[in-house]
Amino acid sequence: MGVEAWSLVLWGLAAAEATPMAEKALPVRVTGPWTVTVGPGETTLRGRRIRLPQEVILEVPRTEVVPVRDERYPALPVFDENAGVWRRGAHFLQLAAEECTATGLLAPGRVRVKPAAGQSGPFVEGQDYRLDEVWANFGRIESGAIGADQEVYVDYDYVPGRLDSVVVDAQGEVKLVLGRPATVDILPPELAPGETAVANLWTAGPLEQLTEENLFPIEPEPATPREGPAVAETLLPKTLAKLRAGEPVTLVAWGDSVTAGGGVGEPQSLWYQHRFAALLRERFPRSEITMLTAAWPGYSSRAYLDQPRGSAYDFERDVLEPKPDLVTIEFVNDAYLNEEQTQTQYAEILERISGAGAEVILIAPHLVRPDWMGMTTMQFDEDPRPYVQGLKRFAATHQVALADASQRWCRLWRQGIPYITLEANWINHPDARGHEIFAQALTDLFPEQ
C-alpha cells in the first residue's frame, strides 16, 4: 500500500470517536520468542464478519541486520554533552530522520570509527570519540586523536523498523504479510484483494524476542453519529455565521514547529492548518477563507507572548493585527506546564485573543515519544500529560472549542497503529498522516454545511 493510499485509510480510522465496543479484536498473543498465535474468536472489521474456530500459530521472521561499511564523514563535530540528545554529534547517515535519527536501531557494540585508509586506527570510544547508541549520534573528543578537519569512516550495523500485518484472506486462511523494512515512513504492507488485517506487528531495532508490546490487534470501530449540534454552533457562532453567509473569513494558526509544518515540510498544502482550510472550503464553498500561520519552531506560547514588538516573532503583529475571525492554538511545546499553570497561561491567551474580537480553538496535541511522557508503552487510552488534562479542563470551564487530536492519537494503537510510526523524526513531528488527524479534529467541530 502506497503512502497516499495508507494515509486515506488512517485518516478515516482516526476520525472515529472512542466508543464502547460490543465486541473486541481477535485474540493475538505471543506464544514463543518469534511466534504469535491468533484466535480462536470472531469479530467484524471493515464490514466483514471474521470467524476463526481454532487458533493459528504464525512464525515471525526477524528483520535482517543491515551492515554499513566505510560510511564517510569529511569531519566530525565535537560531541556536545550539553546539547539536546538528538543533536549532540554527527548522525549516522543510514538512520537519518527529520533533524535527527531513528532511535534504538543501532546494533550495540558494532560501531567502529576509523581513519582513512593507510592511517593508524581504529579510534577508541571514550578516548577519541563519544557515542550515543540509542540516539545514534557521535562526535570527537577535543583531546583525542581525531583532528577537527580529519576525514573519518564508520562501520556499523542496524536493524530497521518493520510493520507486518496478520491477515485473513478471502478463503478464511490466516497468514502474516511482511511490511517493508525502513527507518522512516514505516507503513504496513499493501494487502491483496480479499485480505483483511486483524492485527499489526511492530518490530524495530535488535530484539531478542517478541513481547505483547509488539502486538497491535485491530478493534472494530463503528461510526459514531454526532449527538446534538456541532461544537461551532455554540462555541464558534461568529465564524460559523460568516461561513454560512458566504462572507470572507480569516483564520490564524498559532503554534510551534508542528504549525510551521514540522514533519511534513513541502508541500505546505499538507500542513494541518491548510488541510483544515481546504476542508472548510469544501463545506462552505461561498466563503473566501484565508489561512495565516504564526509559528515559532522550538518555542512555547509563553516565549511567543513575551517577545518584544517588532521582533521576528511578534504576537500582536502575527496573531492579532490581521484581525482574524478565528485563531487555532497548537503548542506541544507547552507540555512542560502542569495542570494549574495551564489554567493561568491560557486565561491570559484567551483574554488577549478574544479581546481582539477573535474566536478560539484549542488543539490538544499529538503524542510524542513515550519516554518523554513518562511512559514505557504506546498502548494507552488516556494522554498522561498534565498539560493536556489542564487544556481540556480549561476548555470546559471557559466554554472554548477544543479539537482533541490527543484523544485520536490515543486511539491509534487500538486501530493497529503504533503511533511512533507517524512521527517523521521519531520524536515529536507528525508526518502528513499525523497532520491530517489535526485537520480532521478541527473540521469535525463544524457542521457539514
Image (cartoon, rainbow, N blue to C red):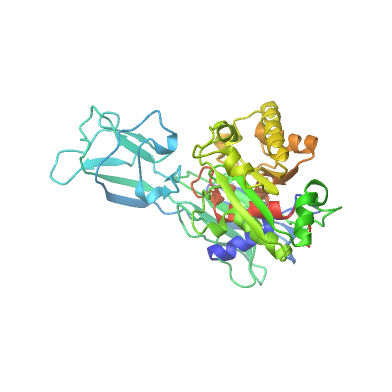
Q: Residue at image x 59%, y 38%?
A: 315
**Total numbered circles:** 0
Residue at image coords 35%, 45%: 92
Q: Position of residue 318 (x, y in %)?
A: 58, 43
Image quadrant for the C terminus? Answer: bottom right
Q: Quadrant of the N terminus?
A: bottom right
Q: Nearer the viewer, residue 449 or 263?
A: 449
**Residue sitting nearer the eye, 330 or 434:** 330
Residue 431 in percent (x, y) is at: 54, 53
Residue 418 visible within the image: no
Task: Check the image and name the residue furthest to the right.
Answer: 228
Q: Residue 391 falls in which quadrant of the image?
A: top right
Vertical placement of residue 368 versus 171, above or below: above
Q: Residue 160, position in %: x, y?
A: 44, 51
Residue 363 visible in the snapshot:
yes
Task: Please give left or right for residue 223 compared with residue 110 in the image.
Answer: right
Give the percent coordinates (x, y) of residue 332.
Answer: 59, 39
268 lies above or below 97: below
Residue nearest the viewer, comparing 216 with 353: 353
The answer to whether 351 is drawn above or below residue 42 in the figure is above
Please name the residue shown 59% across and 61% down the image: 7
Q: Nearer the viewer, residue 16 or 59?
A: 16
Residue 49 falls in image quadrant: bottom right
